[in-house]
Amino acid sequence: MFGLEALDLARIQFAFTISFHIIFPAITIGLASYLAVLEGLWLKTGEEVYRDLYHFWSKIFAVNFGMGVVSGLVMAYQFGTNWGAFSDFAGSVTGPLLTYEVLTAFFLEAGFLGVMLFGWNRVGPGLHFFATVMVAIGTLISTFWILASNSWMQTPQGFEIVDGRVIPIDWFAVIFNPSFPYRLLHMATAAFLATAFFVGASAAWHLLRGRDNPAIRKMLSMAMWMALLVAPVQAFIGDLHGLNTLEHQPAKIAAMEGHWENHPGEATPLILFGWPDMQREETRFKLEVPYLGSLILTHSLDKQVPALKEFPKQDRPNSTIVFWSFRIMVALGLLMILCGLWSLWLRWRGSLFQARPFLHLVLWMGPSGLLAILAGWFTTEVGRQPWVVYGLMRTADASSGQSLAQMSLTLALFVLVYFVLFGAGLGYMMRLVRKGPITHEGKQQGIGGPGQQRTPARPLSATEEGMDDDDNGNSEARS
């Protein structure tokens, strides 16, 4: 298939499925915490706008959560079908970690999800808020265990190899491996930012269409506060993560920088743009800034960064992919910081909700957080190659040995089914976003809070409540 081997197709298949999957957990993590904040603010202030936003985003959360669970199951099966040798070698570490994720995070989320989504009028306000917080905590616990497993594959420790298999001897060292704290913070913060720009883009879309109400304004305001405060923090965490990667995976850093060789006594420049050529062993058409590579990566003006030629050819990551995926992630992060600063200036001028150029930028930045997450994961995973467990097991030795025909057929089926199934799910979710929050339902239907009689909240039946647009672009609910 296109000159690729079965191993290449197995890698592409896993990359394809995990790229689809990561979109949903990222939004789930952010939305769960967002919903907890909204309900907490509603309980504290009594302002209806927070309750309206909670009802609106809980519907989208429910759809997103369901698609995340379904797409995640597929990857778990792939460890056995396509990567059996890896499971046999490292399953005694990765298996228990994924089991802990199910026993703690998934059970916690599943246990309180029904109360959160369908118990608004059946339980008291305290219990309902507690359920929402437990679901939010569950998403973060899930992130904890998944990142612990993946981070161990990046920087393994706390084990010994017996009869060709990894045997854990110190679970604390296994879980809290050298890269884990940085990667956990980086991913959790990325999920919050991705959700903030998803929410902000939804608000910008409605404002650009002339639908201006307190709920829409609150969505944009909260999203831009998140961008202003968290995007710079994410840049700082990324810097710390880079220093950690330089210490434990120097070949990955060399590939990210497109840096091929050091010259005696010369500081390492920062290559802004270029085309790393793996065959010619050079970065072509490069635009570089002297000394800046050393300053950023070593925090000095004289230390050198490891170069790709210092590593055997068979141990070098694909610099062409990693170089550009890293720069896409960084560029999107800088745009997020710009959005946050621009929003602060517009607040000061009192025109945050009327500045159409800014609203257009926020709208186009809607998928930026998810794209940055994908680019970051490509940097992390491709940069780890040729190792599946860094320094211990090569990717070429980890596969189940499936045939080229089998991998071609299953990859084609995955692409077809995923685009049909999850494409429909994403379309449904965007349909909910386009409707926007209904800010007047409390006055018209007598809707109260948790524990009060009202029409049951039905997040998965949201489309039954149709919306008609009038000539001014505003929406009204029809019964």
Image (cartoon, rainbow, N blue to C red):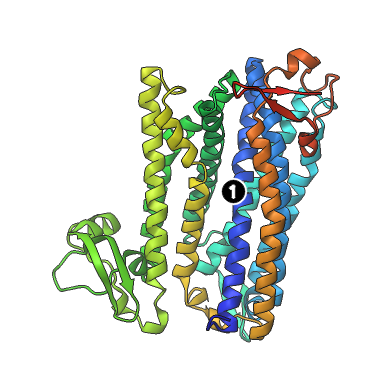
Residue under numbered circle 1: 26
Residue 444, given in percent of the width and then of the height, sits at 77, 14
Q: Give residue 228's quadrant in the image.
A: top left
Position of 342 relative to 291 (above/below):
above
* Rendering coords of residue 397 (x, y %): 57, 84
54, above or below 188, in the image: above
Q: Is residue 392 left or right of residue 361?
A: right
How many circles with numbers are drawn on the protein?
1
Q: Which residue is found at the position 66% from the left and 59% from the top?
A: 419
Identify which residue, 346 or 306, lies in the foreground.
346
Q: Is residue 41 left or right of residue 272?
A: right
For the question of whether residue 402 can be seen, the reply is no
Whole-percent x, y for residue 166 in the image: 61, 77
Residue 379 is left or right of residue 19, and the answer is left
- Left or right of 274? Residue 425 is right
**Residue appearing at x 22%, y 56% in the figure:** 292
The image position of residue 433, as x and y in percent, is 64, 36
Residue occupying image coordinates x 17% and y 59%? 290
Above/below status of 164 relative to 446: below
* Dot 1: element: helix
Q: Please say whether residue 41 is visible from this viewpoint.
A: yes
Picture residue at 68% right of the left edge, 40% below the top: 61
Q: Quadrant of the N terminus?
A: bottom right
Give the farthest residue toward the left.
265
Neighbourhood count class around disc 1 (C-alpha, 10 Å): few under 14, some 14–19, many 20 upward: many
Q: Nearer the viewer, residue 358 or 130?
A: 358
Q: Nearer the viewer, residue 127 or 57?
A: 57
Q: Quadrant of residue 437?
A: top right
**Which quarter of the figure is the C terminus placed in?**
top right
> Residue type at mark 1?
Ala
